[in-house]
Image (cartoon, coloured by chain):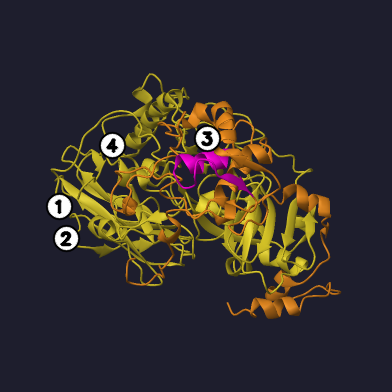
Amino acid sequence: MTRLPWVLALACATAVAADPPTRDDAIQTARFGLGRPATAEEIAAWNIDVNPSGDGLPPGRGSAADGAKVWAAKCAACHGEEGEGNERYPRLVGREPEQGFPFGRHLKYVRTVGNYWPYATTLYDYVYRAMPPTAPGSLAPDEIYGVVAWVLAENRVIPADAVMDAGSLPRVRMPARDRFVDDDRTGGKEFR
Amino acid sequence: MRGDGIVRIIGRMTPHPDPDVVANPARRALLAGAASAGAAAIVASFPTASVGSQDPAAPQVPEDATKVPGGPTTAQSARSAFERPARTPIGQLTGASYTPLQDLSGTITPTDLWFERHHNGVAQIDPARWRLLLHGLVDRPLVFTLDDLRRFPSVTRIYFLECSGNGRNGYRAPKAELSPQQIDGMSANAEWTGVRVATLLAEAGVRRTARWTLAEGGDAAVLSRSIPLEKMMDDALLVYAQNGEPLRPAAGYPVRLLLPGWEGNTCIKWIRRIEAIAEPNMSRDETSRYTDPLPNDTARRFSFVMDVKSTLTRPTFPAVLGAPGWIELSGLAWSGRGKIAQVDVSTDGGRSWAPAQLQPPVLGKAHVRFTRMWKWDGRRTVLMSRATDETGAAQPTLAEFRARRGLGTDYHFNYIRAWVVERDGRVFYGVEV
């Protein structure tokens, strides 16, 4: 189906439609004036994501020592005292192998935060939204910064005494940062 | 053809190898029961010595249904007591349950047999309190109710939806006693009704700096994925109905994102927020998970499109063939890149191939049913299917798949599936053929 480039389609559709649109494309991209403006409070309540630039990180701070207490109380029951994981819950700590990135070649090594995760900010984002599973969203910023610092320090990604906050966390460079490549599959005869 | 690699392990269901999935022995035990019920149904559907009415556990029905009145009308229709297709639930909160592909015909998956995959339980949501927030790099941040969504122009389309980990059981933990359900049961097909995401984005006015969107669920995992704006403007839908009725809770009630042809994890269930953004968010499910380690010491990211794939569904484990003679080979094929162009089947372990019939209509990014008659001569052999899509992409052999993707790769398992027919009529998954 031929369609207007979407930018152009949007430009044509800035005013709320007065008459019913008839062409299929126009029907799908007309403005109908439905919905209502979102309030700043509504956006703030749900806008919880944190990106690699650090956008979305709240005030607060924590070190691995701070995080060790949170880990013992709220994380260790599933992920293990040292982040070793078990059959049910993923291992989070470990740098094996020290060299290389052989995870596609065999299943000898477990993928962890230390040897696989490309961005440290993902830890904050994920722990806040989803951990612990029995009470997601319940950890305070200082607790999350502490747990994130503990996981990173146990993986020897940051020094044991480093403090994580909105300034330092986005600057942490993960060991696997440059291992990821965009999808190069395109269809066609060549299997990639 | 190589039969000596076939491993015979009678026993329990393979636990989900994804570390997210919590194995539950009680549920696994339940599963074993469901699997044998499925086996009974399949055996009964082929000409064999086993007859359902001689089974003391069979449902009681009149000797002659023309001589006594039938049952009353009912508010909801139940299956025949002789048919017991079942999913295979494993895990509790972060769990999965697989569609019994070997028990189904045609292309539309019955809604109650749709596979499930969720990351912290099935969210329970009151539709009157559901809201969708659309914000970020837009001129007009907006909130929509379910009623708002249903006032917009709707579209109805048929699409498959597949977990990108589908096939992992057959690749990572292969054994002869695997059914299509256990290997490929995380792909299913439905008719969906909803609103184009482009319609809502037009309402909000997307700014030129936006290149991606973040889609986020209202479940206890608050699952989030970064989706290129281009896909959202193309064929992305916010669906509220599946097979003619409101979504079921496990499918994301009241509204889910549906990205035709893309991995199921991106089709955010219980969706509550779409944020227009400039760069991807690098959430846990697009970095730690749903990336594909490759043999060249890299990992592929944002590998959204589901590759061309097919599997026979009949005859497959746990079916047992009766006497030699004509049998219809039947299966499903699909591609995330468009329409299936051709499906070939082999009845001699891949030495020769012949085209199967595609049952119309052949729709893009949807399951298509393929069939071909086969005269079984009673000898041991290996059955295979190989799909090609409209871009020319065809399923690789297992060896080709291993060479290109590696033994440790974690998603997008589209190698050719093989099924071994033994002389006694039993059919097994071809582990190494």
Q: Please tell me whether mark 2 sits on a helix, a strand or a loop.
A: loop
Name the N-terminal-most of marks 4 and 2. 4
Of residues B91 and B84, the one drawn nearer to the viewer in this rendering: B91
Amino acid found under the numbered disc labelled 4? Glu
Residue marked by disc 2: B351
Q: Is residue B51 visible to us here? A: yes
Foreground mark, 3 or 4, reads 4
Residue marked by disc 1: B1
Letter of the chain that mark 1 sits on in the rendering? B
Say whether marks 1 and 2 touch (CB < 8 Å): yes
Letter of the chain that mark 2 sits on in the rendering? B
Q: Please tell me whether mark 1 sits on a helix, a strand or a loop.
A: loop
Q: How many marks?
A: 4
Say whether marks 2 and 3 touch (CB < 8 Å): no
Q: CA distance from mark 2 to mark 3?
A: 41 Å
Above or below residue A55? Residue A4 is: below
Residue marked by disc 4: B177
Amino acid found under the numbered disc labelled 1? Met
Give the magenta part as a residue range: A147-165
Q: Please tell me whether mark 3 sits on a helix, a strand or a loop.
A: loop
Amino acid found under the numbered disc labelled 3? Arg
Residue A150 falls inside the magenta stretch: yes
Name the N-terminal-most of marks 1 and 3. 1
Label 2 environment density (alpha carbons within 10 Å; few <14, some 14–19, many ≥20): few
Residue B123 picture quarter: top right
